[in-house]
Image: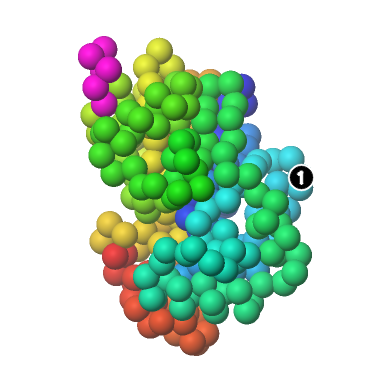
Amino acid sequence: MVGKVALISDVHSNLEALESCLAFAQKEGVDRFAFLGDLVGYNADPSAVISIVKKIVAQGKGFALLGNHDEAMFKKTGLNFNQEAMTAIEWTRGQLKTEDIHFLEELPRIQVEDQAFYAHSTPFEPEAWHYVQHPQHARRCSEFSTKPYTILGHVHDCAIYYELPSHQFYMLKPLPDLPIKVLNRRKWVIMAGSVGQPRDGQPKAHMSIMDFSKQSITFHRLAYDHVTAAQKIENSGLPKSLARRLIFGF
């Protein structure tokens, strides 16, 4: 298995945050990128974000998965979003090129590899966009995936759920820049957080690097020009509340 994989989830059209994370990942010598869904929505640069991710995938440097906001670009019925998110979805549809939509339409919901199962929401019923917010949810994900590592996005916050010999799962809140041993003799459910719209009270982007060769993961919080990203939202006509989210981180 490849060594270092950058886990990048919920970019949500935030170009400045994505560029900061990619630059950091390159400096850290990652071998591959895993984009865990929700490339678009909420922020002001959907087409630019898709262009960057599309290029990385085309070069064979990583893969991208479908998120619920991505799906909303081409699925027009049965959507379950609040009004703020729906306004951003409708605005985003108007910004995308035909080739952007085609790229999103072709994205898979899951990626299964030797030691890892990747999804935006959950391994089971990925089309239903369930949220993993409790150890019991994590246990169900792990039992379904059967892999040592189940790696997910969607909830916009970082967490590690791990299995004890009793088969119960517990949650660990990781600290930034502190490597955590995740030995593959256990089962782990890893929540990657959000690059483009963190919701934990600080504006820094979430990004993590999984080192399969060392069986360790490090979560990072990366500063980026969130003021410019927020100003773009203000200038675009998107809801002003979305700009405030970038400034205050919730």
Q: Position of residue 218 (x, y in %)?
A: 40, 36
**Disc 1 marks which residue?**
59
For label 1, the crowd category at 10 Å Cα-Cα, with few meaning under 14, some 14 to 19 and many 20 or more, is few
Q: Tell whether 160 sits left or right of 129.
A: left
Left/right placement of residue 43 relative to residue 99 reads: left
Q: Which residues are magenta?
A: 164-169
The kind of residue on which mark 1 rests is Gln
As drawn, 68 above or below 24: below
SS of the residue under disc 1: loop
**Helix, strand or loop for the magenta stretch, by majority:** loop
Write the residue at 50% across / 80% down: 232
Does the magenta portion include 92?
no
Residue 93 x, y percent position in the rendering: 61, 74
In the picture, measured across the screen, residue 25 lies left or right of residue 150, that is right
Residue beneath the point at 53% across and 22% down: 115
Indicate the quadrant where residue 135 lies: top left
Q: Position of residue 45 (x, y in %)?
A: 58, 71
Q: Note whether 72 is above or below 175 in the view shown.
A: below
Where's the C terminus, which quadrant?
A: bottom left
Residue sticking out furthest to the front? 78
